[in-house]
């Protein structure tokens, strides 16, 4: 249930973001929130899938291990999640962590 909830919530957020972009109303903060949320939920979901598969969850022949590796790369690539979090934080508080 948790895995399906993560996927559904991420899909709904990204679909709404696409509608906003098509209408020319998407903001940088909205995009950053969606990216940070979706990648965090993706990482959690593939982690649950790996646990569900037990020892087979780390074998490439069962695909889950590849998904875990891909999720880690997307989640942390060059500080992506941290940067998106800082952008959202600036929108919420009005204070920038950037100089």
Image (cartoon, helix red, strand yellow):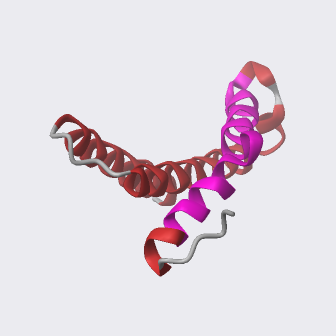
- Relative to 53, 41 lies left or right: left
Locate residue 47, reporting x and y percent.
69, 50
**1 or 87, which lies in front?**
87
In this view of the protein, can residue 84 be seen by the observer?
yes
57 is within the stretch colored magenta: no
Quadrant including the N terminus: bottom left
- 54 w.r.t. 99: above or below: above
User: Looking at the rendering, which quadrant does residue 58 occupy?
Assistant: top right
Up the image or down, 16 lies above or below 65; here it is: below
Where residue 21 sits in the image (x, y, percent)?
26, 39
- Highlighted range, magenta: 62-89
Q: Determine the residue positioned at 50% across, 60% down.
A: 2
User: Residue 62 is drawn in which quadrant?
Assistant: top right
Horizontal side of 99 relative to 94 (left or right) equals: right
Q: Residue at x 73, y 50 (%)?
A: 51
* Residue 30 locus on image (x, y percent): 38, 55
Quarter of the picture containing the C terminus is bottom right
The front one of 20 and 10 is 20
Which percent across, then down, holds residue 5? 41, 57
Q: Which residue is drawn at 60% across and 64% down?
A: 86
């Amino acid at each position: 249930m948790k895995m399906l909830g993560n996927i559904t919530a991420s899909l709904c957020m990204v679909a709404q973001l696409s509608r906003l972009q098509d209408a020319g109303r998407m903001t940088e903060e909205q995009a950053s929130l969606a990216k940070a949320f979706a990648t965090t939920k993706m990482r959690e979901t593939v982690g649950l899938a790996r646990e569900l598969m037990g020892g087979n969850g780390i074998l490439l022949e069962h695909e889950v291990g590849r998904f875990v590796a891909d999720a880690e790369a997307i989640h942390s690539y060059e500080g992506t999640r941290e940067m998106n979090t800082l952008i959202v934080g600036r929108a919420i508080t009005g204070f920038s962590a950037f100089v």
